[in-house]
């Protein structure tokens, strides 16, 4: 076991760095920048049952310390993903991937799961119950413990792969949702998705985004994300992919210490397509510099209970 | 991704600066770059810029100063380095057999036409350029373009050339093919007359290389990313509301 390896959902990840859904397409654009096999895994853009065009433009706005997006789950639909995209991805990435799944209604999630079950490249499903940029589905499920729990239970019945549930930070108490989906059978959690926000174009006196509101990501949300990972870690026993504003190896380590087993890198990829390989390269030196023997031993290291245990 | 060195960064016209960068890869006319304007997280996203010209390892950018980011860019001085994603987008397609072409530029849409005009000139094609500006003070590239093109100018206030909008210039529709860059309203007006040409589009971008889906438009061939499938499209493939 190397200094960076972690166990996650029964697989061994070479390192805990996983590009987050929606910021990495289906990996293909990034394959022209670096060898994707350096990554621990990768998360696909959200896949829905049928093709989705998404929202009108502008879909992107820069804000201090990050960005807003309101893409609206644009994707070619599950059939095209299976027929066209996954074979292309198989040529450039040989590790198990995480397929992010979204839908307007429960049945749509189940349809996508049923179709993707037999794809050997997919190591796990990430159920997206937290997209803030669609009218139906998405965050509607993630902000209601009963709906979330029902969706996860039914997804679990259909899924032949481990189920990760991606949580929304736009809730009163994320621990309640985390516990509900754990009880419903989730194998792991991803947190956090984006925080709902907006930007105003004061010259034109109207919202910058055509969708009015969008999801805030980037360094601005890291303290919120860390706090939520820290809280959830203490209350659930399933592993966590922590994410929110990770730009550097230092950021990644903060999430590990807060309780994450793996770390998602999101909008950093858009600013710098080499963000993930740079983080991976810097991690071993940082782990040693901080006086730890390996990253696995650092998981949850910032919790008092852990300190007593050590 | 490359570290490019600022060779010069000067006022060029009203609200327009010219920046020359060295250490660049060769670019086709119509391609663009994404510039990380500062290392900090204050300007989180890169900025997309069209390329006025690319020669040897020199890249000439003209940029309009419109927001915090471009205002900050004006403070960069020779010797500063910038992290730049290069050779993005498809660029204009040039058919050497097509001689009777015109260039249509509105506002900052004029910038990428310089490199295109020079490339056409190298191929023995001398196009006519129809350029539209708000006013005389914002007009630029006229002398540079005049060396390789016939140039016709309009300004909205009539302070230079003919008064009015560039797409009202009927002469340009007598050419059999066009390359058009400018505001959407201008492109739409041209496309309604004829779709025999290529148009370069602009949109707010997240990444510039096709990953974030921030700049998607619907075309007659399905959804397209302006950054990756464009920015240059055949006018006939575009859909106008």
Image (spheres, rainbow, N blue to C red):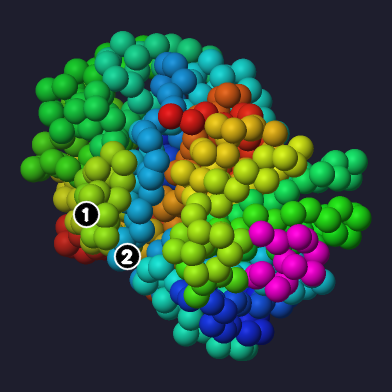
Q: Residue B151 location in percent, x, y?
A: 70, 61
Q: Find disc 2 in the rendering and name its residue.
A: A65
Q: Residue A309 location in percent, x, y?
A: 22, 59
Q: Chain of mark 1?
A: A
Kindly indicate whether the residues beneath marks 2 and 1 are on one polypeptide chain: yes
- The part of the chain drawn in magenta is B141-152
Name the residue rendered at 64%, 32% in the picture.
B195
Q: Residue B237 location in percent, x, y?
A: 61, 29
Quadrant location of the C terminus of chain A?
A: bottom left
- Crowd around label 2: few <14 · some 14–19 · many ≥20 (10 Å): some
The image quadrant that residue A220 belongs to is bottom left
Above or below A176: residue B129: below
Q: Find disc 1 in the rendering and name its residue.
A: A205
Q: Is residue B77 visible?
A: yes
Q: Is residue B48 left or right of residue A168?
A: right
- Does dot 2 land on a helix, a strand or a loop? loop
The image quadrant that residue B3 belongs to is bottom right
- Crowd around label 1: few <14 · some 14–19 · many ≥20 (10 Å): few
Q: Nearer the viewer, residue A17 or A139?
A: A139
């Amino acid at each position: 076991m190397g200094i960076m390896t972690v166990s996650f959902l029964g697989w061994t990840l070479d390192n805990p760095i996983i590009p987050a859904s929606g910021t990495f397409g289906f990996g293909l654009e990034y394959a022209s920048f670096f060898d994707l096999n350096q990554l621990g895994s990768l998360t696909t853009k959200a896949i829905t049952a049928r093709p989705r065009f998404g929202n009108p433009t502008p879909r992107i706005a820069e804000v201090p310390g990050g960005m807003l997006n309101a893409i609206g789950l644009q994707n070619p639909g599950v059939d095209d993903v299976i027929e066209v995209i996954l074979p292309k991805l198989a040529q450039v990435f040989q590790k198990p991937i995480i397929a992010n799944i979204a839908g307007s209604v429960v049945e749509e999630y189940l349809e996508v799961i049923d179709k993707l079950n037999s794809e050997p490249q997919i190591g796990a499903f990430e159920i997206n119950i937290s997209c803030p940029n669609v009218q139906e589905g998405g965050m509607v499920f993630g902000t209601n413990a009963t709906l979330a729990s029902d969706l996860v239970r039914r997804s679990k019945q259909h899924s032949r792969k481990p189920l990760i549930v991606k949580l929304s930070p736009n809730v009163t108490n994320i621990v309640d949702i985390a516990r509900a989906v754990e009880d419903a059978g989730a194998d792991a959690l991803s947190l956090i998705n984006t925080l709902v926000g907006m930007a105003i174009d004061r010259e034109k006196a109207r919202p910058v985004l055509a969708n009015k509101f969008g999801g805030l990501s980037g360094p601005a949300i890291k303290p919120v994300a860390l706090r939520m990972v820290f809280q959830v870690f203490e209350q659930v026993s399933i592993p966590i992919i922590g994410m929110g504003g990770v730009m550097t190896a230092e950021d990644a380590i903060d999430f590990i210490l807060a309780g994450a087993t793996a770390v998602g890198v999101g909008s950093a990829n858009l600013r710098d397509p080499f963000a993930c390989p740079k983080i991976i390269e810097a991690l071993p030196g940082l782990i040693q510099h901080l006086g730890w023997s390996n990253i696995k031993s650092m998981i949850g290291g910032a919790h008092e209970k852990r300190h007593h245990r050590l | 991704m490359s570290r490019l060195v600022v060779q010069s960064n000067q006022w060029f016209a009203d609200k327009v600066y010219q920046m020359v960068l060295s250490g660049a890869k060769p670019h086709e006319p119509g391609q663009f770059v994404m510039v990380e304007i500062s290392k900090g997280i204050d300007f989180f996203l890169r900025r997309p810029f069209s390329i006025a010209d690319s020669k040897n390892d020199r890249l000439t950018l003209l940029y309009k100063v419109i927001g915090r980011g471009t205002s900050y860019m004006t403070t960069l001085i020779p010797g500063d380095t910038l992290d730049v994603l290069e050779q993005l987008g498809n660029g204009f397609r040039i058919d050497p057999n097509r001689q009777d072409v015109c260039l249509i530029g509105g506002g900052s849409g004029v910038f990428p036409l310089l490199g295109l005009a020079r490339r056409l000139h190298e191929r023995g094609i001398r196009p006519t350029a129809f350029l539209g500006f708000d006013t005389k003070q914002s007009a630029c590239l006229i002398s540079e373009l005049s060396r390789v093109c016939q140039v016709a100018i309009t300004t909205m206030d009539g302070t230079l050339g003919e008064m009015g909008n560039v797409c009202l210039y009927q002469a340009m529709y007598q050419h059999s093919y066009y390359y058009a860059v400018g505001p959407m309203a201008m492109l739409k007006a041209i496309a309604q007359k004829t779709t025999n040409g290529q148009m370069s589009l602009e949109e707010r971008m997240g990444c510039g290389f096709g990953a974030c889906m921030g700049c998607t438009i619907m075309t007659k061939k399905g959804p397209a990313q302006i950054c990756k499938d464009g920015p240059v499209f055949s006018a006939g493939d575009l859909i106008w509301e």
